[in-house]
Image (tube, rainbow, N blue to C red):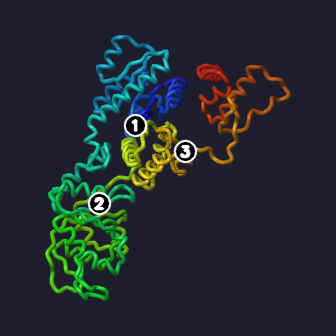
Amino acid sequence: MTHQEHLLPLLVVEDDAAIRELLEEELQDAGYKTLGVPSAEEAIALLSHTTVSLVITDVRLPGMTGIQLLQQLRHAGSELGIIVITAFGTIDQAVEALKLGADDFLTKPLDLDAIREAVFRVLERQRLAVSHDSDISHFHGIVGKSQVMQALFHDASRLAKSDAPILILGESGTGKELLARAIHQESPRNDQPFVPVNCASIPADLMESEFFGHVKGAFTGANEARKGLFHSAHGGSLFLDEIGEMPINLQAKLLRALQEKTVRPVGGEREEPVDVRIIAATHRNLEKEIEQDNFRSDLFYRLETFSLRIPPLRERGADIEHLVFALIDKHSEAQSKQIEKIEPEALNDLLNYTYPGNVRELENAIMRAVTLSEDGSLSHKDLPERLREQATTEPGTPLVPTLSGEVVAGSQMPTPPPIRWPSLEEVEKRYINKVLEATGGNKRRTAEVLGIARRTLYRRLEDKEE
């Protein structure tokens, strides 16, 4: 499939509010999400905690100039796409900006088509650059180019070389088993078994036998001896998912197995040696479980020495974009379907959703969308209802018909004028205000309702404010 639209927002830095809004609305029409600020200082503050894909900045700004913003971002090592715009452009200024690392340079009066084309070119170059180094964005099947995931991959690779137990922490759906498998693959044990077990799925009265095995006649129904999970994982790795669900009496025996590297089968009289690397995982707060006497502190400290935390999807910045396209490729191939594009509305839904179920929830949404997609396109209607709901009009909101016959959310249509006959200019101002109110301040929609060009609307709004 193609990156027809970009998932991360574009940042517009322009002190002229009308021009900034015009730029944002044009880019939103092209399928991009945008953020806007009036100064370079506010742009730097926003970039300290928000991930964007591209910066469009005017040169002349209050305080720090757009050129100084460009210099500061490049000096800090930022690889963001940067487009510089000015009404006072010269060849020398353009050359200076490009030498300092700008990706493009445009002059006012703004050619909106040229801006769209410039944005597309810069983002396409970024996409191609990402595709060339995509090997570093994957760690044994885990997708992640964000700084936090790159740090996780680095730490996991280092810890994998040791033989010490590892504790993986993370919310449900973050991919704890995937990381455990990756650690096993990075370890010297990668040619030996990887045995996963969910501690929450084994009945408490059978758990000891499942882990350590039993001898013949150990209990009713034990008609023959049976090896446990530790023996099955001998030489390799045993993954204990949801270890916080393990009964506390079994935790003591697990700790002994870790310390002594031996296990005693149920009903057995002697210890049997095992060579197993333990990788445990939980979504629970084990320190709180210790306070409530549900988890042994000595086992926790034994495991916690080497712990890794998988961040939830909402903390992973740009990774959602890579995950969306990787999962579309995965599931379209699995279903033998050709997905050529994803509609902008569907992309915005996927970007704005909070994903309480993390990567697992995103994957389920993509799998559903691929299954329901038609004509090689993923659309808004193909996504689960909970994702679609975030973009729908709130119930009870009045609708205003446009000149084309469609409806927009807002308040009621303009009320009749008072008995005192107003001037034509006053009527126009009132009508524009009412339509602006009806469209929730959306100037693009307002211009459509009024049947005028957007630039005409901006000019009339400026006249109204004088």
The kind of residue on which mark 1 rests is Met
Asked whether the residues under the numbered discs 2 and 1 touch, taking CB atoms below 8 Å apart as contact, a structural biologist would say: no
C-alpha separation, residue under disc 2 versus residue under disc 1: 34 Å
Residue under the image location 27 percent in, 86 percent down = 223
Inspect this view and state whether residue 466 appears: no
**Residue 141: percent from left, percent from top:** 29, 49
Quadrant of residue 57 within the rendered picture: top left
Residue under the image location 39 percent in, 57 percent down = 173
Among all residues in the image, which is located at the extreme right? 419
Q: Is residue 285 above or below residue 43?
A: below
C-alpha separation, residue under disc 1 versus residue under disc 3: 19 Å
Asked whether the residues under the numbered discs 1 and 3 touch, taking CB atoms below 8 Å apart as contact, a structural biologist would say: no
Task: Look at mark 2 in the image and give the residue it sits on.
Answer: 168
Quadrant of residue 107 within the rendered picture: top left
Instruction: Please report whichever mark, 2 or 1, sits nearer to the chain's N-terminal start.
Output: 1
Image quarter where the N terminus lies is: top left
The kind of residue on which mark 3 rests is Lys
**Residue 310: percent from left, percent from top:** 32, 54
Asked whether the residues under the numbered discs 2 and 3 touch, taking CB atoms below 8 Å apart as contact, a structural biologist would say: no
**Residue 400: percent from left, percent from top:** 70, 36
Q: Name the disc covering residue 1, or none.
A: 1
Give the label, 2 or 3, closer to the camera: 3
Image quarter where the C terminus lies is: top right
Helix, strand, or loop for circle 3? helix
Q: Is residue 435 left or right of residue 256?
A: right
Q: Name the disc covering residue 213, or none.
A: none
Instruction: Please report whichever mark, 1 or 3, sits nearer to the chain's N-terminal start.
Output: 1
Quadrant of residue 204 within the rendered picture: bottom left
Task: Look at mark 3 in the image and give the residue it sits on.
Answer: 381
The kind of residue on which mark 2 rests is Ile
Counting the numbered discs, the total is 3
Inspect this view and state whether residue 387 appears: yes
